[in-house]
Image (cartoon, helix red, strand yellow):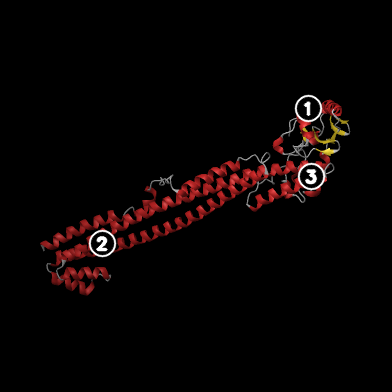
Amino acid sequence: MKRALTLLLTAALLAAATLGLSAGVSTAWSAVGRTEAKKDPADPQTKRDKVRRQRAASAAKLDALKADADQVDRAIADLEANTKSRQSELAAAKSAEEQAAKNVADAQAEVDAVSARIGTLAQATKKAAILAFTSGGESELFSSMLTGGSNQAPSQDLYYNLAVGDLQGALNELEAAQHQLQRAKAKAERAAQAATKRRQRVEQKIEDLNTAIAQQEQLGSSLENRFEDALAEAEGLAELDSALSKQISQREKAIIARARAAGIKGATVDKKGKIKVPVIPTSANGLVRVNGVLMDRSIGNAFARLVAEAAADGINLTGGGYRSAQAQINLRRGNCGPTDYDIWERPPSECSPPAARPGHSLHEKGLAIDVRCNGRLISRYSDPCFAWMAEHAPKVGLHNDVTHREAWHWSINGN
């Protein structure tokens, strides 16, 4: 009887401890810290990743209007490599996250199974102890088990141990299950911690990929602007030098094609918003013709002085000046579409054939001149006529920006 009372008290304590062990397992995720282990900066992969990021950041900032074709190609390649790397890292992170979630589910299932077993053992132990205490003998306990004890296998094993007098063995079995629960809980918490880190890593990799895509869009928009400037100039040169006009168009189309093949596009234009049609660009002061070149009156006297100076040195300066914006509008309507969006906002690369948007060149305001020297377009910076212009033109307010790679193009600001 004394031993049965001891068993009853011990079983009650063990059952209470069981409730504490089985509680709070599912809250392990919320208690996990959010600090991911830092990568070793000396690791080769970390170094490569850092270099790739730096190159991508530099590529995104490239001024495509002033870069040569090789620089643009390198920028395209760097951004493509960076984006592919981020996509690969994201895929790996998602796979690791899925495995971590499976580990959490498996660990929780183990906790649930052990908790259920402990509940059964604790209930059977308590019931057996009560029967032993009230029956006054183990033979009556054995009889009770045979005539209506628990129908669960773990309980029957325990009842048998109690009935034959192995009370300590039954307690040991319950205690062992509780230790197993502690181990299962620790395993579940570790799995939850790992899963939280994997989830955070996926979120970081998504952010990295979005950054890489934004960098591509930044370069893509810059390339679209470069393409449009080149198209506007090529369209104006069509009559002055058809071969050079075609060369410029083909060169820029090839650059845009390489960017598209690498997945680099400009930022998407919102086609749903109301299109604000700008004022059609034109000469602000009326047009004058100087030595056959049509231009805004504001630069007429300056170019006339330049023509006179050139004539004194045996050079005849002519060229192409003002171009009608309305002609460009008509071209866009035919190549890009009839709507305001088509004419004023659709990227040139989406038109067939590509065409620059109206107002994209100072020629449409009569403030730029494509200079011909003795009947020949100044197409190279090594041309002696370019050297002469570089010396004299700035004195009358006409400039050439060499970064645009257009030796023939002179305007009030070089653009």
Identify the residue at horizontal 85%, vertical 43% (top origin): 239
Q: In this view, does 35 lie to the left or right of 206?
A: left
Q: Which of marks 2 and 3 is nearer the N terminus?
A: 2
Q: Give x and y (percent) for residue 128.
A: 19, 66
| Quadrant, the C terminus | top right
Give, as a three-letter code, the residue at label 3: Leu
- Quick one: SS at disc 1? helix
Tag shown at residue 244: 3
The residue labelled by disc 1 is 392
Nearer to us: label 1 or label 3: 1
Q: Nearer the viewer, residue 72 or 382?
A: 382
Residue type at mark 1?
Answer: His
Mark closest to the chain's N terminus, 1 or 3: 3
Quadrant for the N terminus in the image: bottom left
In this view, the mark in front (2 or 1): 1
Foreground: 210 or 256?
256
Q: Name the residue under label 2.
A: 177
Question: Quarter of the image holding residue 328?
Answer: top right
Left or right of residue 305: residue 96: left
Q: Three-letter amino acid code at disc 2?
A: Ala
